[in-house]
Amino acid sequence: MDISGLGARDLAGRMARREISPVEVMRATLDRIAAVNPGLTAIVSLRDREALMGEARLAEAALMGGGPQGWLHGIPVAVKDLVDVKGLPTSCGAPFLAGQLARADAGIVARMRAEGAIVIGKTNVPMFGLGGHSTNTVFGVTKNPYDPTRTAGGSSGGAGAALASGLLSVADGSDMMGSLRNPAAWNGVYGFRPTVGLIPREGVPGTPAYGVSTLGPMAREIADLAALLRTMSGGAFTGIGTAPKRPRIGWLGDWGGAYPMEPGILALAEAALAPMQEAGWVVEPVAPPVPRELLWDAWTDLRAFAVAQDLVEHWRDPEARAQLNPQAVHEIERGLALTGEALARALDLRGVWLAALDALFATHDALVLPATQLWPFPVEWDWPREIAGVAMDTYHRWMEVVVPASLAGLPVLGMPAGLGEQGLPGGLQLIGPHGSDARLLALARSYEAVIGPRPILG
Protein backbone atom coordinates (compact mmCIF):
# COMPACT_ATOMS: atom_id res chain seq x y z
CA MET A 1 0.00 0.00 0.00
CA ASP A 2 1.35 3.43 -0.99
CA ILE A 3 0.50 5.40 2.14
CA SER A 4 1.85 8.66 0.64
CA GLY A 5 -0.98 8.83 -1.89
CA LEU A 6 -3.82 8.50 0.62
CA GLY A 7 -5.90 11.39 1.90
CA ALA A 8 -6.12 12.24 5.59
CA ARG A 9 -9.65 10.95 6.08
CA ASP A 10 -8.78 7.74 4.24
CA LEU A 11 -5.69 7.28 6.42
CA ALA A 12 -7.66 7.93 9.59
CA GLY A 13 -10.34 5.43 8.57
CA ARG A 14 -7.80 2.74 7.79
CA MET A 15 -6.10 3.30 11.14
CA ALA A 16 -9.42 3.13 12.98
CA ARG A 17 -10.13 -0.20 11.25
CA ARG A 18 -6.61 -1.45 12.18
CA GLU A 19 -5.66 -1.87 8.52
CA ILE A 20 -2.59 0.27 9.10
CA SER A 21 -1.11 1.78 12.24
CA PRO A 22 0.04 5.30 13.19
CA VAL A 23 3.56 3.85 13.45
CA GLU A 24 3.42 2.64 9.85
CA VAL A 25 2.03 5.98 8.69
CA MET A 26 4.73 7.97 10.49
CA ARG A 27 7.51 5.69 9.25
CA ALA A 28 6.30 5.92 5.66
CA THR A 29 5.93 9.70 5.93
CA LEU A 30 9.41 10.25 7.34
CA ASP A 31 10.97 7.86 4.82
CA ARG A 32 9.32 9.73 1.95
CA ILE A 33 10.42 13.08 3.37
CA ALA A 34 13.98 11.78 3.61
CA ALA A 35 13.87 10.67 -0.02
CA VAL A 36 11.98 13.55 -1.64
CA ASN A 37 12.24 16.67 0.51
CA PRO A 38 15.98 17.37 -0.05
CA GLY A 39 15.17 18.06 -3.70
CA LEU A 40 12.20 20.31 -2.88
CA THR A 41 12.71 22.04 0.52
CA ALA A 42 8.99 21.87 1.16
CA ILE A 43 9.23 20.86 4.84
CA VAL A 44 11.61 22.68 7.19
CA SER A 45 12.42 22.47 10.91
CA LEU A 46 11.70 18.73 10.79
CA ARG A 47 11.56 17.24 14.28
CA ASP A 48 13.71 14.36 15.52
CA ARG A 49 12.70 11.04 13.98
CA GLU A 50 12.79 9.06 17.22
CA ALA A 51 10.65 11.64 19.01
CA LEU A 52 8.08 11.47 16.21
CA MET A 53 8.09 7.68 16.18
CA GLY A 54 7.50 7.79 19.92
CA GLU A 55 4.44 10.01 19.43
CA ALA A 56 3.19 7.63 16.74
CA ARG A 57 3.54 4.70 19.17
CA LEU A 58 1.50 6.63 21.73
CA ALA A 59 -1.14 7.28 19.07
CA GLU A 60 -1.20 3.57 18.28
CA ALA A 61 -1.61 2.66 21.94
CA ALA A 62 -4.53 5.10 22.21
CA LEU A 63 -6.20 3.43 19.22
CA MET A 64 -5.73 0.02 20.77
CA GLY A 65 -7.30 1.37 23.95
CA GLY A 66 -10.50 1.95 22.04
CA GLY A 67 -11.27 5.45 23.30
CA PRO A 68 -12.78 8.20 21.13
CA GLN A 69 -10.31 9.62 18.63
CA GLY A 70 -10.27 12.77 16.52
CA TRP A 71 -10.39 12.58 12.74
CA LEU A 72 -6.67 13.52 12.51
CA HIS A 73 -5.56 10.88 15.05
CA GLY A 74 -2.05 9.77 14.13
CA ILE A 75 -1.90 11.93 10.98
CA PRO A 76 1.45 13.73 10.44
CA VAL A 77 1.04 17.44 9.73
CA ALA A 78 3.51 20.26 9.12
CA VAL A 79 2.50 23.85 9.96
CA LYS A 80 3.17 26.90 7.81
CA ASP A 81 6.25 28.71 9.10
CA LEU A 82 4.28 31.87 9.87
CA VAL A 83 2.32 30.06 12.59
CA ASP A 84 3.53 29.22 16.10
CA VAL A 85 4.07 25.62 17.18
CA LYS A 86 5.25 25.23 20.76
CA GLY A 87 8.91 24.23 20.85
CA LEU A 88 9.53 24.86 17.14
CA PRO A 89 11.00 28.00 15.55
CA THR A 90 8.70 30.43 13.77
CA SER A 91 11.29 31.94 11.46
CA CYS A 92 8.83 33.52 8.98
CA GLY A 93 11.73 33.15 6.55
CA ALA A 94 13.58 35.98 8.35
CA PRO A 95 17.18 35.36 9.44
CA PHE A 96 16.81 37.57 12.53
CA LEU A 97 13.96 35.32 13.76
CA ALA A 98 15.58 31.98 12.90
CA GLY A 99 15.94 29.67 15.87
CA GLN A 100 13.53 31.54 18.16
CA LEU A 101 11.25 28.88 19.63
CA ALA A 102 7.52 29.48 20.04
CA ARG A 103 6.30 29.28 23.62
CA ALA A 104 2.78 28.13 22.80
CA ASP A 105 0.70 26.68 19.98
CA ALA A 106 -1.35 29.00 17.81
CA GLY A 107 -5.07 28.34 17.99
CA ILE A 108 -5.25 26.37 14.74
CA VAL A 109 -2.37 24.17 15.88
CA ALA A 110 -4.03 23.47 19.22
CA ARG A 111 -7.22 22.54 17.38
CA MET A 112 -5.38 20.16 15.02
CA ARG A 113 -3.61 18.54 17.96
CA ALA A 114 -6.95 18.15 19.74
CA GLU A 115 -8.09 16.08 16.74
CA GLY A 116 -5.04 13.85 17.14
CA ALA A 117 -2.61 15.36 14.59
CA ILE A 118 1.13 14.87 15.13
CA VAL A 119 3.12 17.98 14.19
CA ILE A 120 6.32 16.89 12.45
CA GLY A 121 7.73 20.29 11.43
CA LYS A 122 6.97 23.41 9.40
CA THR A 123 6.38 24.24 5.72
CA ASN A 124 8.54 26.78 3.92
CA VAL A 125 7.52 30.36 3.09
CA PRO A 126 8.96 33.57 1.64
CA MET A 127 10.01 36.14 4.23
CA PHE A 128 6.86 37.11 6.16
CA GLY A 129 4.78 35.47 3.44
CA LEU A 130 5.45 38.26 0.93
CA GLY A 131 6.12 37.71 -2.74
CA GLY A 132 4.42 34.56 -4.04
CA HIS A 133 7.73 32.65 -4.30
CA SER A 134 8.75 30.54 -1.29
CA THR A 135 12.40 31.43 -0.97
CA ASN A 136 14.38 32.83 1.95
CA THR A 137 17.92 32.95 3.31
CA VAL A 138 17.08 30.70 6.27
CA PHE A 139 16.06 27.51 4.48
CA GLY A 140 16.42 28.24 0.77
CA VAL A 141 13.92 27.92 -2.06
CA THR A 142 10.99 25.53 -2.36
CA LYS A 143 10.96 23.81 -5.74
CA ASN A 144 8.02 22.60 -7.78
CA PRO A 145 7.47 18.81 -7.81
CA TYR A 146 6.37 19.03 -11.45
CA ASP A 147 9.67 20.68 -12.42
CA PRO A 148 12.29 21.36 -9.72
CA THR A 149 13.78 24.17 -11.79
CA ARG A 150 10.53 26.11 -11.20
CA THR A 151 8.93 27.77 -8.20
CA ALA A 152 6.24 26.09 -6.10
CA GLY A 153 4.64 29.50 -5.56
CA GLY A 154 3.77 31.06 -2.25
CA SER A 155 3.43 32.01 0.32
CA SER A 156 2.07 28.54 1.16
CA GLY A 157 4.55 27.08 -1.33
CA GLY A 158 6.04 24.56 1.07
CA ALA A 159 2.56 23.27 1.87
CA GLY A 160 1.59 23.00 -1.80
CA ALA A 161 4.77 21.18 -2.77
CA ALA A 162 4.46 18.83 0.21
CA LEU A 163 0.91 17.88 -0.81
CA ALA A 164 1.77 17.41 -4.47
CA SER A 165 4.73 15.15 -3.64
CA GLY A 166 2.92 13.05 -1.04
CA LEU A 167 4.83 14.33 1.99
CA LEU A 168 1.57 15.43 3.65
CA SER A 169 -2.08 14.50 3.24
CA VAL A 170 -3.46 17.89 4.39
CA ALA A 171 -1.84 21.23 5.22
CA ASP A 172 -2.68 24.60 6.70
CA GLY A 173 -1.91 27.81 4.88
CA SER A 174 -2.84 31.48 4.78
CA ASP A 175 -3.83 33.91 2.08
CA MET A 176 -3.56 37.65 1.72
CA MET A 177 -2.83 37.99 -1.98
CA GLY A 178 -3.23 34.49 -3.35
CA SER A 179 -0.98 32.65 -0.91
CA LEU A 180 -3.33 29.63 -0.87
CA ARG A 181 -4.51 29.89 -4.47
CA ASN A 182 -1.17 30.46 -6.23
CA PRO A 183 0.59 27.36 -4.80
CA ALA A 184 -2.58 25.30 -5.22
CA ALA A 185 -2.56 26.15 -8.94
CA TRP A 186 1.15 25.54 -9.40
CA ASN A 187 1.14 22.24 -7.50
CA GLY A 188 -2.11 20.82 -8.85
CA VAL A 189 -3.98 20.71 -5.52
CA TYR A 190 -6.78 22.59 -3.72
CA GLY A 191 -6.33 25.68 -1.55
CA PHE A 192 -9.26 27.43 0.14
CA ARG A 193 -9.34 31.03 1.27
CA PRO A 194 -12.49 31.10 3.47
CA THR A 195 -14.66 34.09 4.20
CA VAL A 196 -12.49 36.42 6.25
CA GLY A 197 -13.25 35.94 9.95
CA LEU A 198 -14.39 32.31 9.71
CA ILE A 199 -11.09 31.06 11.17
CA PRO A 200 -9.91 32.70 14.42
CA ARG A 201 -6.36 34.05 14.30
CA GLU A 202 -5.34 33.68 17.95
CA GLY A 203 -1.62 33.07 18.35
CA VAL A 204 -0.89 33.81 14.69
CA PRO A 205 1.47 36.72 14.01
CA GLY A 206 -0.08 39.57 12.10
CA THR A 207 -2.81 42.14 12.54
CA PRO A 208 -5.96 41.46 10.47
CA ALA A 209 -6.17 45.13 9.52
CA TYR A 210 -9.15 45.75 7.21
CA GLY A 211 -9.71 41.99 6.90
CA VAL A 212 -7.26 41.46 4.05
CA SER A 213 -5.79 38.14 5.20
CA THR A 214 -7.06 34.80 6.45
CA LEU A 215 -5.86 31.33 7.35
CA GLY A 216 -7.13 28.38 5.32
CA PRO A 217 -6.71 24.69 4.46
CA MET A 218 -5.01 22.88 1.56
CA ALA A 219 -5.52 19.29 0.43
CA ARG A 220 -5.62 16.92 -2.52
CA GLU A 221 -9.29 16.13 -1.85
CA ILE A 222 -12.27 18.40 -1.22
CA ALA A 223 -13.53 16.23 1.66
CA ASP A 224 -10.16 16.54 3.43
CA LEU A 225 -10.16 20.28 2.75
CA ALA A 226 -13.60 20.66 4.32
CA ALA A 227 -12.67 18.54 7.34
CA LEU A 228 -9.57 20.61 8.01
CA LEU A 229 -11.56 23.83 7.58
CA ARG A 230 -13.98 22.63 10.23
CA THR A 231 -11.08 21.96 12.59
CA MET A 232 -9.26 25.23 11.85
CA SER A 233 -12.46 27.22 12.35
CA GLY A 234 -13.18 25.61 15.70
CA GLY A 235 -16.45 24.23 14.36
CA ALA A 236 -17.72 27.52 12.91
CA PHE A 237 -17.69 25.74 9.55
CA THR A 238 -19.94 22.72 9.98
CA GLY A 239 -19.49 20.91 6.68
CA ILE A 240 -20.04 20.91 2.93
CA GLY A 241 -23.43 22.26 1.95
CA THR A 242 -25.77 21.62 -0.95
CA ALA A 243 -24.99 22.97 -4.39
CA PRO A 244 -27.68 24.48 -6.63
CA LYS A 245 -28.96 21.99 -9.22
CA ARG A 246 -28.06 24.22 -12.16
CA PRO A 247 -25.57 26.73 -10.76
CA ARG A 248 -25.00 29.83 -12.83
CA ILE A 249 -21.32 30.72 -13.02
CA GLY A 250 -19.81 33.97 -14.30
CA TRP A 251 -16.54 33.59 -16.25
CA LEU A 252 -14.39 36.73 -15.91
CA GLY A 253 -11.45 35.47 -18.00
CA ASP A 254 -8.62 37.97 -18.25
CA TRP A 255 -10.79 40.88 -17.07
CA GLY A 256 -11.61 41.99 -20.58
CA GLY A 257 -7.97 41.85 -21.64
CA ALA A 258 -6.78 43.98 -18.74
CA TYR A 259 -4.73 41.22 -17.08
CA PRO A 260 -1.75 40.16 -19.21
CA MET A 261 -1.29 36.40 -19.30
CA GLU A 262 1.44 34.13 -20.61
CA PRO A 263 0.56 32.04 -23.66
CA GLY A 264 -1.49 29.01 -22.73
CA ILE A 265 -2.71 30.21 -19.33
CA LEU A 266 -6.09 31.49 -20.50
CA ALA A 267 -6.55 28.52 -22.85
CA LEU A 268 -5.95 26.05 -20.00
CA ALA A 269 -8.43 27.89 -17.79
CA GLU A 270 -11.04 27.98 -20.55
CA ALA A 271 -10.56 24.24 -21.18
CA ALA A 272 -11.22 23.65 -17.46
CA LEU A 273 -14.67 25.20 -17.87
CA ALA A 274 -15.73 22.02 -19.70
CA PRO A 275 -15.69 19.85 -16.55
CA MET A 276 -17.84 22.50 -14.89
CA GLN A 277 -20.37 22.24 -17.67
CA GLU A 278 -20.17 18.44 -17.47
CA ALA A 279 -21.00 18.78 -13.76
CA GLY A 280 -24.18 20.64 -14.75
CA TRP A 281 -23.00 24.21 -14.28
CA VAL A 282 -24.14 26.99 -16.59
CA VAL A 283 -20.96 28.93 -17.36
CA GLU A 284 -21.28 32.24 -19.17
CA PRO A 285 -18.91 35.15 -19.85
CA VAL A 286 -19.28 38.20 -17.64
CA ALA A 287 -17.95 41.64 -18.48
CA PRO A 288 -15.60 43.16 -15.87
CA PRO A 289 -17.85 45.20 -13.57
CA VAL A 290 -15.16 47.68 -12.46
CA PRO A 291 -11.81 48.82 -13.88
CA ARG A 292 -8.77 46.80 -12.82
CA GLU A 293 -7.02 49.94 -11.52
CA LEU A 294 -9.84 50.64 -9.09
CA LEU A 295 -9.21 47.24 -7.50
CA TRP A 296 -5.44 47.58 -7.63
CA ASP A 297 -5.35 51.05 -6.09
CA ALA A 298 -7.62 50.10 -3.21
CA TRP A 299 -5.86 46.79 -2.64
CA THR A 300 -2.27 48.01 -2.63
CA ASP A 301 -3.04 50.77 -0.12
CA LEU A 302 -4.97 48.51 2.27
CA ARG A 303 -2.39 45.74 1.95
CA ALA A 304 0.54 48.07 2.57
CA PHE A 305 -1.14 49.55 5.62
CA ALA A 306 -1.82 46.08 7.06
CA VAL A 307 1.70 44.80 6.39
CA ALA A 308 3.28 47.94 7.83
CA GLN A 309 1.27 47.46 11.03
CA ASP A 310 2.65 43.92 11.29
CA LEU A 311 6.28 44.54 10.43
CA VAL A 312 7.15 48.10 11.41
CA GLU A 313 8.95 46.96 14.59
CA HIS A 314 11.48 45.10 12.44
CA TRP A 315 11.90 48.09 10.12
CA ARG A 316 12.66 50.30 13.13
CA ASP A 317 15.36 47.91 14.34
CA PRO A 318 18.48 48.76 12.28
CA GLU A 319 19.90 45.24 12.49
CA ALA A 320 16.66 43.60 11.41
CA ARG A 321 15.93 46.26 8.80
CA ALA A 322 19.22 45.49 7.06
CA GLN A 323 18.03 41.89 6.60
CA LEU A 324 14.53 42.63 5.31
CA ASN A 325 13.90 41.65 1.71
CA PRO A 326 12.82 44.27 -0.87
CA GLN A 327 9.21 43.06 -0.74
CA ALA A 328 8.91 43.77 2.98
CA VAL A 329 10.63 47.15 2.65
CA HIS A 330 8.29 48.12 -0.19
CA GLU A 331 5.17 47.33 1.84
CA ILE A 332 6.36 48.90 5.10
CA GLU A 333 7.53 52.15 3.57
CA ARG A 334 4.43 52.47 1.41
CA GLY A 335 2.22 51.73 4.41
CA LEU A 336 3.97 54.25 6.64
CA ALA A 337 3.62 56.94 3.99
CA LEU A 338 -0.16 56.54 3.64
CA THR A 339 -2.35 59.38 4.82
CA GLY A 340 -5.76 59.09 6.41
CA GLU A 341 -7.21 60.54 3.24
CA ALA A 342 -5.56 57.81 1.15
CA LEU A 343 -6.94 55.07 3.39
CA ALA A 344 -10.41 56.58 3.27
CA ARG A 345 -10.23 56.64 -0.53
CA ALA A 346 -9.14 52.98 -0.58
CA LEU A 347 -12.12 52.03 1.57
CA ASP A 348 -14.45 54.02 -0.69
CA LEU A 349 -13.08 52.19 -3.73
CA ARG A 350 -13.59 48.87 -1.99
CA GLY A 351 -17.18 49.93 -1.35
CA VAL A 352 -17.68 50.44 -5.08
CA TRP A 353 -16.39 46.90 -5.71
CA LEU A 354 -18.59 45.41 -2.99
CA ALA A 355 -21.65 47.04 -4.54
CA ALA A 356 -20.69 45.65 -7.96
CA LEU A 357 -20.33 42.19 -6.42
CA ASP A 358 -23.79 42.42 -4.90
CA ALA A 359 -25.17 42.94 -8.38
CA LEU A 360 -23.12 40.05 -9.81
CA PHE A 361 -24.13 37.61 -7.10
CA ALA A 362 -27.77 38.57 -7.52
CA THR A 363 -27.68 36.69 -10.83
CA HIS A 364 -24.76 34.25 -10.39
CA ASP A 365 -23.94 31.59 -7.81
CA ALA A 366 -20.18 31.94 -8.25
CA LEU A 367 -17.52 33.60 -10.36
CA VAL A 368 -14.46 32.06 -12.03
CA LEU A 369 -11.06 33.52 -12.84
CA PRO A 370 -7.69 31.97 -13.68
CA ALA A 371 -5.62 31.51 -10.51
CA THR A 372 -2.38 32.84 -12.03
CA GLN A 373 -1.29 34.95 -14.98
CA LEU A 374 1.79 32.90 -15.82
CA TRP A 375 3.34 29.47 -15.44
CA PRO A 376 5.66 28.61 -12.54
CA PHE A 377 8.79 30.67 -13.14
CA PRO A 378 12.48 29.75 -12.63
CA VAL A 379 13.52 29.32 -9.00
CA GLU A 380 16.42 31.74 -9.50
CA TRP A 381 14.06 34.68 -10.05
CA ASP A 382 12.90 36.84 -7.17
CA TRP A 383 9.78 37.80 -9.14
CA PRO A 384 8.71 38.08 -12.81
CA ARG A 385 9.60 41.41 -14.38
CA GLU A 386 7.13 41.05 -17.26
CA ILE A 387 4.22 38.98 -18.50
CA ALA A 388 3.67 38.55 -22.24
CA GLY A 389 5.80 41.62 -22.89
CA VAL A 390 4.02 43.79 -20.31
CA ALA A 391 6.36 45.19 -17.63
CA MET A 392 5.42 44.59 -13.99
CA ASP A 393 5.68 47.84 -12.02
CA THR A 394 5.82 46.23 -8.54
CA TYR A 395 7.08 42.97 -7.05
CA HIS A 396 3.52 41.62 -6.87
CA ARG A 397 1.76 43.00 -9.96
CA TRP A 398 2.16 39.60 -11.62
CA MET A 399 -0.38 38.21 -9.10
CA GLU A 400 -3.02 40.85 -9.82
CA VAL A 401 -5.66 38.31 -10.87
CA VAL A 402 -6.16 37.26 -7.22
CA VAL A 403 -6.99 40.78 -6.05
CA PRO A 404 -10.75 40.83 -6.78
CA ALA A 405 -11.53 38.14 -4.20
CA SER A 406 -8.92 39.31 -1.69
CA LEU A 407 -10.12 42.90 -1.65
CA ALA A 408 -13.68 41.82 -0.86
CA GLY A 409 -12.74 39.19 1.75
CA LEU A 410 -14.75 36.57 -0.15
CA PRO A 411 -14.48 32.79 0.04
CA VAL A 412 -12.48 31.52 -2.93
CA LEU A 413 -11.18 28.09 -3.83
CA GLY A 414 -8.01 27.53 -5.81
CA MET A 415 -8.70 24.48 -8.01
CA PRO A 416 -6.48 22.49 -10.40
CA ALA A 417 -7.12 23.14 -14.07
CA GLY A 418 -4.73 20.56 -15.54
CA LEU A 419 -1.34 20.76 -17.24
CA GLY A 420 -0.10 23.03 -19.99
CA GLU A 421 2.00 22.03 -23.00
CA GLN A 422 5.21 22.10 -20.93
CA GLY A 423 3.75 19.77 -18.32
CA LEU A 424 3.34 22.59 -15.79
CA PRO A 425 0.11 22.92 -13.80
CA GLY A 426 -2.33 25.81 -13.76
CA GLY A 427 -5.47 26.55 -11.81
CA LEU A 428 -8.76 28.37 -11.39
CA GLN A 429 -10.35 30.54 -8.73
CA LEU A 430 -13.94 29.72 -7.80
CA ILE A 431 -15.33 32.74 -5.94
CA GLY A 432 -18.55 32.88 -3.94
CA PRO A 433 -20.44 35.57 -2.04
CA HIS A 434 -19.63 36.37 1.58
CA GLY A 435 -20.44 33.44 3.86
CA SER A 436 -21.07 30.93 1.06
CA ASP A 437 -18.16 28.66 2.06
CA ALA A 438 -20.26 25.50 2.46
CA ARG A 439 -22.06 25.98 -0.86
CA LEU A 440 -18.81 26.82 -2.66
CA LEU A 441 -17.21 23.58 -1.48
CA ALA A 442 -20.32 21.70 -2.60
CA LEU A 443 -19.79 23.12 -6.08
CA ALA A 444 -16.13 22.15 -5.91
CA ARG A 445 -17.04 18.59 -4.98
CA SER A 446 -19.08 18.22 -8.18
CA TYR A 447 -16.11 19.57 -10.18
CA GLU A 448 -13.78 17.13 -8.41
CA ALA A 449 -16.08 14.24 -9.30
CA VAL A 450 -15.50 15.04 -12.98
CA ILE A 451 -11.73 15.70 -12.98
CA GLY A 452 -10.88 12.83 -10.63
CA PRO A 453 -8.35 12.48 -7.79
CA ARG A 454 -5.16 14.51 -7.61
CA PRO A 455 -1.98 12.54 -8.27
CA ILE A 456 1.22 12.72 -6.25
CA LEU A 457 4.56 13.36 -7.93
CA GLY A 458 7.85 11.53 -7.58
Image (tube, rainbow, N blue to C red):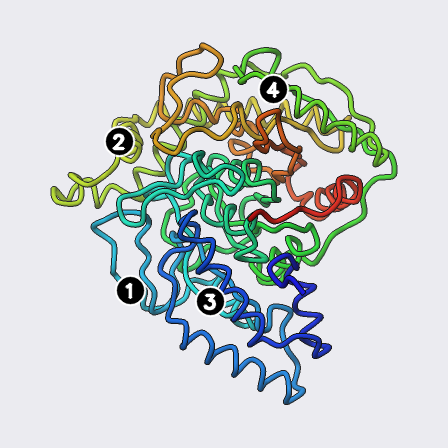
Q: Mark 3 or mark 2: which is in front?
A: 3
Amino acid residing under circle 3: Val
> What distance separates the C-alpha of mark 2 from that of mark 1?
26 Å
Residue 87 in the image: above or below residue 259: below
Pinpoint residue 5: horizontal percent, then vertical percent: 64, 56
Residue 127 in the image: above or below residue 280: below
**How many residues crowd around disc 3 within 10 Å: few (fewer than 14), some, or many (20 or more)?**
many
Pinpoint residue 363: horizontal percent, then vertical percent: 77, 26
Identify the residue shown where x is 29% and y is 35%: 328
**How many residues crowd around disc 4 within 10 Å: few (fewer than 14), some, or many (20 or more)?**
some
**How many residues crowd around disc 1 within 10 Å: few (fewer than 14), some, or many (20 or more)?**
some
> What distance separates the C-alpha of mark 3 from that of mark 2?
32 Å
Determine whether label 2 and label 4 are within 8 Å by CB. no
Identify the disc placed on residue 326: 2
Identify the disc placed on residue 101: 1
Amino acid residing under circle 2: Pro
Identify the disc placed on residue 119: 3
Which quadrant would the N terminus be assigned to in this image?
bottom right
